[in-house]
């Protein structure tokens, strides 16, 4: 009687209405609330983009000031949460720490969990955006055995994150404005990407009316996988393995060979069948950061050559495989001194606003229902129970 569609991987199922992000995969277009990602990356800053995603419009002067004040106000973690980090093994993956600590926020911030109250929803959203850099930096500090560095509210969002990550009490740390701007741009490029796996996870978790902090922890868990947020780490490993320009053709042949599981990491996308617009901005940023730091990373030259050769190969053209956002981001992050285990953490930090904006849109949707996919049952037909002695 009821209509049923079997769609593994949800390749053709629309799960919601949304006004936040538009992607045209054929043309390689990404827009947030109607503004192109290229223009936002060039002219805006991450705080503005957060406001835009959450509220639908760019803020005016006083709205921006109030929003930044609220985010700044919430950057500290409850001191008992600082102890929470110390319970993890030193060698824990920082994503594991992040899943745990963000989930634990549900036990600390009870006054922002009544999701029927718009004010509490706003406070939960601001707390998540504000505390994520502190959590990410703490996860890093803990892994290298250095003391936690508290937020400094005279710095902007990206600057503050860099100082919490890289400053040590014994030395003066001055934030390099070029690096802070590049960090801010990386956050903008990762802020939202409509109904990807982690965002859909947040929406599904939240559709039952669950605690918002616990829902974001679920999103972080989903992002951790190598087919999603873990790809930037894989690109770097691949470039290191290729090692020299002369070996690129060999790896391209491997990627084309169906009997070889190897794929060109940072290439291809479920939605983009054209150059990922974020990859183009990332490539420019990559050149700027390396020039600023005076780093000559042979991996960048290797990446550009790989891109050139792959794009001129009929296999990649026919299958419409182009560089995605992860292709160049690993090289910038490496130049900025982030260990590879932090790459996905930075993605999670930046994507938090997207998760929160999508969660808020869902809660405020009058047609919202609990998400409950159906299944195609392929198990046993009915049979009788066998007593233990007879099995
Ligand atoms: N190298 C070689 N061949 C590829 C690649 C690649 N990177 N990506 C796809 N193909 C081929 C694939 O073998 C298949 O060929 P055929 O039709 O002959 O079987 C065809 O292209 C379609 O691939 P698919 O796996 O069916 O496509 P999908 O939409 O399920 O997968 C993807 C998309 C991103 C998982 C995939 O392109 C991939 O594994 N890329 C490498 C990993 C990567 O860079 N991931 C980051 C994605 S962007 C950031 C994010 O979402 O977090």
Image (cartoon, grey):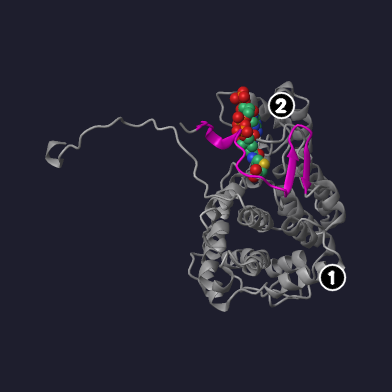
Q: Is 209 above or below relative to 270?
A: below
Position of the N terminus, as image quadrant, is: top left
Q: Judge whether residue 26 is colored magenta.
A: yes
Residue 316, labelled with which disc?
2
Q: In the image, is residue 258 part of the stretch drawn in magenta?
A: no
Q: Are marks 1 and 2 in contact (CB under 8 Å)?
A: no
Q: Is disc 1's CB within 8 Å of ligand 1?
A: no
Q: Observer-nearest residue: 31 or 85?
A: 31
In the image as oriented, which residue stretches furthest toward the front? 1
Query: What is the x, y in percent for residue 202?
Result: 57, 52
Report the magenta residues as a range: 3-32
Q: Nearer the viewer, residue 377 or 184?
A: 377
Q: Is residue 263 visible?
A: no
Say which residue label 1 marks: 62
Determine the main secondary structure of the stretch shown in magenta: loop
- Residue 137 lies, in percent from the top left, at 64, 66
Q: Residues within 10 Å of mark 1 (few under 14, many from 20)?
A: few
Does any portion of residue 123 appear in the rendered image? yes
Left or right of residue 302, residue 240 in this image: left
**For ligand 1, which image quadrant applies?**
top right
Front residue of 173 and 105: 105
Dot 2 alpha-carbon crowd within 10 angstroms: few under 14, some 14 to 19, many 20 or more = some
Q: Secondary structure at mark 2?
A: helix
Q: Residue at x 57, y 54 (%)?
A: 220
- Residue 127: x, y in percent? 64, 68
Q: Position of residue 75 (x, y in %)?
A: 68, 72
Residue at position x 67%, y 36% from top? 242
Residue sitting farthest toward the left: 389
Q: As rendered, which of 62 and 85 lies closer to the eye?
A: 62
Quadrant in the picture for residue 99: bottom right
Q: Is residue 121 left or right of residue 6?
A: right
Q: Is mark 2 within 8 Å of ligand 1?
A: yes
């Amino acid at each position: 009687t009821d209509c049923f569609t079997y769609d593994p991987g949800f390749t053709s199922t629309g799960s919601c209405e949304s006004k936040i992000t538009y992607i045209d995969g054929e043309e390689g277009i990404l827009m947030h609330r109607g503004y192109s990602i290229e223009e936002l990356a060039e002219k805006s800053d991450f705080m503005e983009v957060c406001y835009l995603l959450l509220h639908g419009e760019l803020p005016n002067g006083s709205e921006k000031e109030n929003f930044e004040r609220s985010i700044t106000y919430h950057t500290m973690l409850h001191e008992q949460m600082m102890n929470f980090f110390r319970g993890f093994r030193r060698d824990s993956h920082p994503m594991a720490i992040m899943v745990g600590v963000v989930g634990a926020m549900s036990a600390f911030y009870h006054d922002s969990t009544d999701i029927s109250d718009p004010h509490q929803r706003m406070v939960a959203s601001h707390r998540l955006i504000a505390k994520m850099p502190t959590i990410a930096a703490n996860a890093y500090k803990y892994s290298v055995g250095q003391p936690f560095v508290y937020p400094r509210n005279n710095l902007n969002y990206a600057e503050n994150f860099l100082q919490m990550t890289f400053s040590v009490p014994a030395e003066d740390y001055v934030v390099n404005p070029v690096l802070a701007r590049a960090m801010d741009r990386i956050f903008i490029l990762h802020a939202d990407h409509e109904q990807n796996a982690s965002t859909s996870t947040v929406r599904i978790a939240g559709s039952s009316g669950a605690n918002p902090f616990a829902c974001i922890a679920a999103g972080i868990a989903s992002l951790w996988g190598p087919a999603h947020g873990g790809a930037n780490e894989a690109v770097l490993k691949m470039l290191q393995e290729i090692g020299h320009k002369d070996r690129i053709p060999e790896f391209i042949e491997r990627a084309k060979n169906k009997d070889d599981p190897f794929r060109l990491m940072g290439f291809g996308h479920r939605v983009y069948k054209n150059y990922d617009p974020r990859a183009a901005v990332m490539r420019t940023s990559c050149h700027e950061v390396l020039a600023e730091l005076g780093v000559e990373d042979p991996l960048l030259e290797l990446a550009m050559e790989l891109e050139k050769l792959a794009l001129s190969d009929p296999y990649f053209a026919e299958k419409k495989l182009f560089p995605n956002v992860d292709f160049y981001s690993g090289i910038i992050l490496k130049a900025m001194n982030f260990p590879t285990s932090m790459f996905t953490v930075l993605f999670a930090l930046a994507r938090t606003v997207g998760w929160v904006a999508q969660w808020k849109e869902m809660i405020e949707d009058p047609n919202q229902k609990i998400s409950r996919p159906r299944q195609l049952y392929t198990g046993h037909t009915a049979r009788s129970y066998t007593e233990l002695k007879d099995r």
